[in-house]
Amino acid sequence: MKRTLNKLFPARVLRGLGALALMSLTVGVQAQQSYPNQPIRIVVGYAAGGTTDILARSLGEQMGKILGQTIIVDNKPGAASNIGAAYVAQSKPDGYTLYMATVASHGINPALYKGKLTFDPLKDFAPISLVASIPLALVTSVKLPVKTLGEFVDYARKNPGKLNYASSGNGSPGHLAAAMFNDAMKLDIVHIPFKGGALANTSVIAGDTQLTFATLPGVLPHVQSGKLNVLAVTTAARSKEIPQTPTIAEAAKLPDYEINTWNALLAPKGTPPAVVERLNAAIAQAMKSPDLIQRFEREGATPVTSTPEQLNTFIATEIVKWGKVVDRTPMSTN
């Protein structure tokens, strides 16, 4: 091969090409070593003030201290978070535009919007790390004459088709969690979708609907004030916030029933591995901050971390899991 190259190119040209290649490699290494040298954006696919937004801001503040750069949260709400995800997927893969993924954007939406997404949740992103796990809680109206999950199941079976469950919309985690429970327990409870979790919760508080599966942070104040009854949580283990409340798996004897909503940090595909590693290390360090842990727990979230490889496998598994649920869940036309 050497002889062939020498015949094709003069020695001075080969020396020049070698120097150029070495220079490119050196520039790449230097760029990664100097990262970050400008502010970083974390794009959130929801409006400001929600749980994902609050978690992104808390994480960004701690990571900014570690990385020595300002981290800005950029809200791009719409289309069930698909707008924000598509924006990041199409962004420059330099580590300065990141995405706060959710169970919706990278678990449910690939099936819910099959053939309509402008991004591939696996192929268009470089996974960095999981950052949070958030339980759902099954809460009921105080007007319903039940205090435990067992009592609720008995009541629902005696009143088929007469109970309604509220959700924050078709295909939302709360909708699908309730549908899974409905199927597993052979119940006949009618789905009523609302435009957002707050409206769904309000309808249950008023007694217009009888129950909802909602994020624990969204309903805990209403439980504590006596406006809602909490019967169970959807996670494998009990919540630290309400340790006296059983899981659905234990109370309903459904060992395979487990649902977590989650958040993860992603970058656009093609982001240099060294940059991904730097961000992953910063997340791991940030998660040790007592202040961040306290802020996450206030939102009902448990801080978690992972390697990029673990996150990639996790997202692939979630897409398959939720795809099966979406395929067998009818979407309400209300």
Image: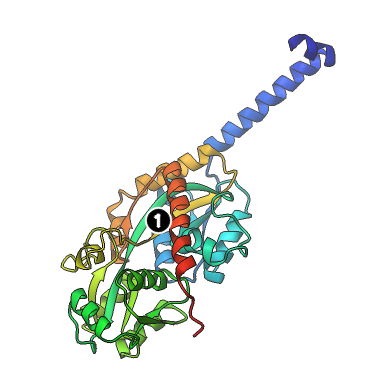
Residue that mark 1 sits on: 59
Position of residue 269 in the picture relative to residue 202 (left or right):
right
Q: Position of residue 65 (x, y in %)?
A: 41, 49
207 or 28, which is in the foreground? 207
Task: Tell me residue 329's x, y (percent).
Answer: 45, 71
**Residue 166 location, quadrant:** bottom left
Q: Quadrant of the N terminus?
A: top right
Q: Amino acid at mark 1?
A: Leu
From the viewer's side, name the closer residue of 289 and 43.
43
Residue 309 at x, y percent in the picture: 45, 42
Residue 74 at least partly seen: no
Along the line of sight, which residue is nearer the eye, 132 or 157? Answer: 157
Residue sitting at x 63%, y 60%: 118
Residue at left 19%, top 75%?
150
Foreground residue among 254 and 56: 254
Question: Residue at image x 23%, y 68%?
Answer: 252
